[in-house]
Amino acid sequence: MTRTLRRLAALVLLFAPLLASAQEPPQIDVIGGQAAALPIAVVPFAGSAGETDIAKVVAADLDRSGQFRTLPEGDMVERPTTSAQVSYPTWRTLRQDFLLIGRVIPDGAQLRVEYELFDIAKQTRILGEAKIAPGAAARDVAHQIADAVYEKVLGVRGAFWTRIAYVTASGTGNNRHYELMVADSDGFNAQSVVSSPQPLLSPSWSPDGKRIAYVSFDRGSSSIYIQNLASSGRELIASFRGINGAPAFSPDGSRMAMTLSRSGNPEVYVMDLGSKQLHQITNQMGIDTEPVWSADGGTIYFTSDRGGRPQIYQAPASGGGATRLTFQGSYNARATVSADGKKIATAQGNGNAYRIALMDRALGNRWTTLSPGNLDESPSFAPNASMLLYAAKEGGRSVLYTVSADGRARLRLPVAGANVQEPAWGPYRQKR
C-alpha cells in the first residue's frame, strides 16, 4: 500500500468507519413510531399499472416521512375510486384526517393516473390531478403524487421524487469490487453508474442532479472525478500529490470544495470548475475534511480534529477564521446542513457508539439523537430537510436507512449489494 493510500485509509477510518458486508431483501420496514403523525387513508387505485402498485408506493412514501400515518388496507371498510363514492362519515368513524383515491387508465404505452385528495373534517376535495406518463414510469408518478399530497397538506415541497447515491463493495481480497449506485429515494430502481476493482468514496450530487462527483483509486492513488449521468462520461478534476478527497459542489455548481494534502497536511480547498484555480480555505495543523456548503454559498462547514477530536467547524467560503459549532459528544463528523441553515446533522460518537444526531440551531443548539445503532454514519438531508439518509451496521450487515428529521419514523431501504457506504441524497428533480 502506498503512503498516500495509507494516509487516506487513516482519514477514512477516522471520520467514516466502514461497514460490514450485507445483502438486503427488497422490502421496506417501518422501525419507528408515528403516534403524532396525520392519519390518511390511501385507498388502492382502480386499474393496473403493471408491477407497480401506485397506492402502495404513495403510502410507503408518506409513512417514511414521519408526518403521516397511513391506514392499513385491512381496516378500510370501503374502497372508493371516484368522488361520488366517498362517504365522509365512514372515514370520520375510522378517524382519518385525509383520504386519497385514484384510478389508473392504460392508454397504449402510456398511463393516465387520476387522483383526488379529500379533507375529511371539511368534507371537501382539496386536490385533484391527472398525470400521463410512460408505463415504465409508474413509480415516478407515484412519488410525484406523494410529493403533491405532502405539499398540499403541510405547505412544504415533498422530496419523494428524488434520487440517492451510495457505494457498495462486494467480494474479498483480490476479488473486491466497488460500485457507485443511483436509486430512487425509496431505494428502488437502483442502477450502477461507476464500477471499479478499486475503492470508490464520497459521492456528491451537483445541484442540477445531472452529475456526481466522487473519489476513485483507478489511477493508483486518490483522484476526484465528475461523472455525467446522462452521457456516462467523466472528467478528472483533481489528482494532486497526496490526498484528493471529499468533493462537494457549490450551490450554483460553479465551484467545488474538497480536501487536498498537496501542501503536506489535509486542508479544505475550493476549486473554480471553469478555470480549475484553487483557493485554500483552511490552514491548520490536524485534519480538515468533509466540506459542505451553506445554501447561499457563503459558508463552508467541515470536520476537523484541530481541537484533539473530530468536530464540526464553519468558515467563510472566501477563506478566513473558522468557528467551532459542535460541542456535545466527543466526536462529530460528516455534517449535513439543512437549506435554511437551522439544522445540522452529524455522525456523533460517544464511547464506542456512533449515532446520527441533529442539532437545531433555532432551538438553542438543542440535540436530538435520531438513530439507535452502534455504528451509524454519513447522514445526508433530503432537499426539504424533512428526512435524512444514512448508513448503518446492523447485526454484521450493512444497510441504508431513512429517518424523519423529528425522529418519528425510521425505515430500512432495499439495497442489492454488500458493504453499503457513504450515501448522499440528491437534489429536487425538475417538475413534470
Image (cartoon, rainbow, N blue to C red):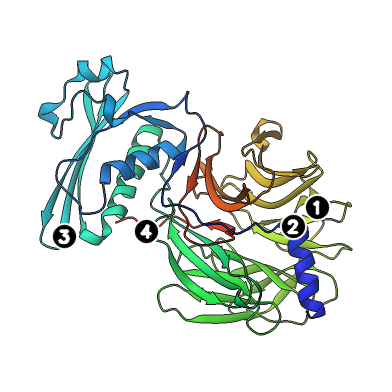
Residue sitting at x 33%, y 38% = 149
Marks 3 and 2, how far apart at CA: 47 Å
Quadrant of residue 230 in the image?
bottom left
Above or below for 286 versus 40: below
| Number of disc labels | 4
Q: Quick one: 154 or 93, which is closer to the camera?
A: 93
According to the picture, the residue beneath numbered tag 3 turns out to be 110
Which image quarter: residue 89? top left
Q: Are marks 1 and 2 in contact (CB under 8 Å)?
A: yes
Instruction: Assess disc 2: are there few (<14), some (14-19) or many (≥20) residues with their C-alpha within 10 Å of its C-alpha.
Output: many
Disc 4 residue crowd, few under 14, some 14–19, many 20+, Cα 10 Å: few
Q: Judge by depth and name the residue closer to the eye, 285 or 58.
A: 58
Say the numbered circle drawn on residue 310. Answer: 1
Q: CA distance from mark 3 to mark 4?
A: 20 Å
Q: Position of residue 69 (x, y in %)?
A: 40, 29
C-alpha distance separating marks 4 and 2: 34 Å
The three-letter amino acid code for the residue at tag 4 is Gln
- Between marks 4 and 1 in the image, the one whose residue lies nearer the viewer: 1
Q: Is residue 195 above or below residue 94?
A: below
In the rendered structure, the answer to whether residue 54 lies left or right of residue 276 reads left
Q: Which mark is residue 15?
A: 2
How far apart, in angstroms, are the residues tagged by discs 1 and 3? 52 Å
Could you give the CA–CA distance between mark 1 and mark 2, rounded to whole angstroms?
8 Å
**Disc with the residue nearer the chain's start (1 vs 2):** 2
Residue flagged by tag 1: what amino acid is it? Pro
Give the labeled residue for mark 4: 430
Q: Nearer the viewer, residue 105 or 282?
A: 105
Expressed as whole percent of the image width and height from the top left, the position of residue 49 reads: 20, 52
In primary-sequence order, the first of circles 4 and 2 is 2
Q: Secondary structure at mark 1?
A: loop
Q: Which residue is depicted at the point 33% across and 45% down?
A: 57
